[in-house]
């Protein structure tokens, strides 16, 4: 079924989400965590640029029914996009004024301040419906999280208002599980979290889920998986960083006769089409100014992508795209809405041919890593900066 709408047809470029790739990544994680651990799909930052509206129904189709967002506005978007009976958890920002809205929709949220706990109780009483909360415990990140000295008062409230609160989770977050340079800090956090959970249990406080792991923690510290894992970057097919990938290979590459196969596939592709073709004689400048001089008779393809779409101006003369399964260099300045590409050495390029900016074409891949190395950015940042207004389509 073609899900592209008229406004999609009008757009100069588009993103495709591969359901097969996503399914593969989820299977990889489910094998790793086993049947007793819940997989929570982290979709903050517009599903890491993949688009909440398209990503959520696709993930539901693949059996995911637990999602995590940063803020209430993202929760609202996910709630609207969801087709089935999934749970949404807000890990960060929700105004006290929006708590009633969340309770009415069974959306759970992190509690890291006594003030928010009080607001949750008040809203729950008013609605006659309990609030679903996750107690976010401070373990050493020192960003958000309830410190231990605040817990006695919190425990009193939890007991006194137990009719109005459902403790969905006890949770924490690690300060850099992707790098061995943080090993001491992270292991101390794990220990601290376990101690706090045990201490709370003694006081009669338990959550439905104990959860702490992001992608890197799931991969590098199996003991952090507990009851639920919050997987962001890796479900989209990216390793949190190179070190985590190397670490995984070292542990899992047992047959040295075979090359190691990446168990993750990239879900996202970014594509466009050749807009026009022009033959330019040797000794001519291409585009604005004197940035690119033809050294021979050349064929130049224009592609309707530019820095307004996130294709950085710093890719002038160095960016690469795929056309007809071949790598084609940017020739000249990256414009606001246009690229000029040298296709002289590629056979028979036609107007309308597919151009791949990120993703696969025949046996070539433009990785986000190569794109982001050119931009000197990390995967997370490149992904979330993909413009929200580019159309996104799910493909098999
Ligand atoms: C973003 C985030 C995650 C997911 O992190 P990844 O590295 O993308 O897997 C998990 N937990 C919290 C609290 C987060 O903010």
Image (tube, rainbow, N blue to C red):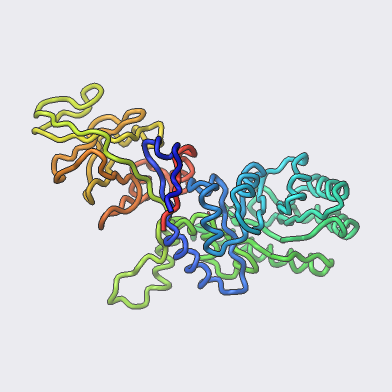
- Depth check: 194 or 82 in front? 82
> On the rendered structure, is 176 left or right of 286?
right
Visible residue check, residue 179: no
Q: Is residue 27 left or right of residue 294?
A: right
The residue located at (65%, 59%) in the rendering is 85
Q: Quadrant of ligand 1?
A: bottom right
Residue that protrudes farthest toward the top in the picture: 289
Q: Is residue 231 above or below residue 120?
A: below
Taking the image as drawn, is residue 161 in sight?
Answer: yes
As drawn, the residue found furthest toward the right would be: 160
Tag count = 0
Residue located 19% across and 37% down the image? 342
State the residue in front, 264 or 219: 264
Residue furthest front in the image: 1
Question: Which residue is at 9% across, 28% downward?
Answer: 281
**68 or 134, which is in the foreground?**
68
Q: Would you identify the image quadrant in which residue 276 lies?
A: top left
**Quarter of the C terminus within the rendering:** bottom left
| Residue 233 spot, x, y in % from top left | 49, 55
Q: Is the residue 227 above or below the residue 10 in the image?
A: below
State the image coordinates of residue 112 (x, y, percent, origin top left).
73, 50
Report x, y in % for residue 144: 68, 48
Q: Is residue 274 left or right of residue 189?
A: left
Residue that appears at 40% across and 60% down? 265
Against 188, residue 352 (above or below) is above
Tell me: 270 left or right of 22: left
Residue 213 percent coordinates (x, y): 59, 61
């Amino acid at each position: 079924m073609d899900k592209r709408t008229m406004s999609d047809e009008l757009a100069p470029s588009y993103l495709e989400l591969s359901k097969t790739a996503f399914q593969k990544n989820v299977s990889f994680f489910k094998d790793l965590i086993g049947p007793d651990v819940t997989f929570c799909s982290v979709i903050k930052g517009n599903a890491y640029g993949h688009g909440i509206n398209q990503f959520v129904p696709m993930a539901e189709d693949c059996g995911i029914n637990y999602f995590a967002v940063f803020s209430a506005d993202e929760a609202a978007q996910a709630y609207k996009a969801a087709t089935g009976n999934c749970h949404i958890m807000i890990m960060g920002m929700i105004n006290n004024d929006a708590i009633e809205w969340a309770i009415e929709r069974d959306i759970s949220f992190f509690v890291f301040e006594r003030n928010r706990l009080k607001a949750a109780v008040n809203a729950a009483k008013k609605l006659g419906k309990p609030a679903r909360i996750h107690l976010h415990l401070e373990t050493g990140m020192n960003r958000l999280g309830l410190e231990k000295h605040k817990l006695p008062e919190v425990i009193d409230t939890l007991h006194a208002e137990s009719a109005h609160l459902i403790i969905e989770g006890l949770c924490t977050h690690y300060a850099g599980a992707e790098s061995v340079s943080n090993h001491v800090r992270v292991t101390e956090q794990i220990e601290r979290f376990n101690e706090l959970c045990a201490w709370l249990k003694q006081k009669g406080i338990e959550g439905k889920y104990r959860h702490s792991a992001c992608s890197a923690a799931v991969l590098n510290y199996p003991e952090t998986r507990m009851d639920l894992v919050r997987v962001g970057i890796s479900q989209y097919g990216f390793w949190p960083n190179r070190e985590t990938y190397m670490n995984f290979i070292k542990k899992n590459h047992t047959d040295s006769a075979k090359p190691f196969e990446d168990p993750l596939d990239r879900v996202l592709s970014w594509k466009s089409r050749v807009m026009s073709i022009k033959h330019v004689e040797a000794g001519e400048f291409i585009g604005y100014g004197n940035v690119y001089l033809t050294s021979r008779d050349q064929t130049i393809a224009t592609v309707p992508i530019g820095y307004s779409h996130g294709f950085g101006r710093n890719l002038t003369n160095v960016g690469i795209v795929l056309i007809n399964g071949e790598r084609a260099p940017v020739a000249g300045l990256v414009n606001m809405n246009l690229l000029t590409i040298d296709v002289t050495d590629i056979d028979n390029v036609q107007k309308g041919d597919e151009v791949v900016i990120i993703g696969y074409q025949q046996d070539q891949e433009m990785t986000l890593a190569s794109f982001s190395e050119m931009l000197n950015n990390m995967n997370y940042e490149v992904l979330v900066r993909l413009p929200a207004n580019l159309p996104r389509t799910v493909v098999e």
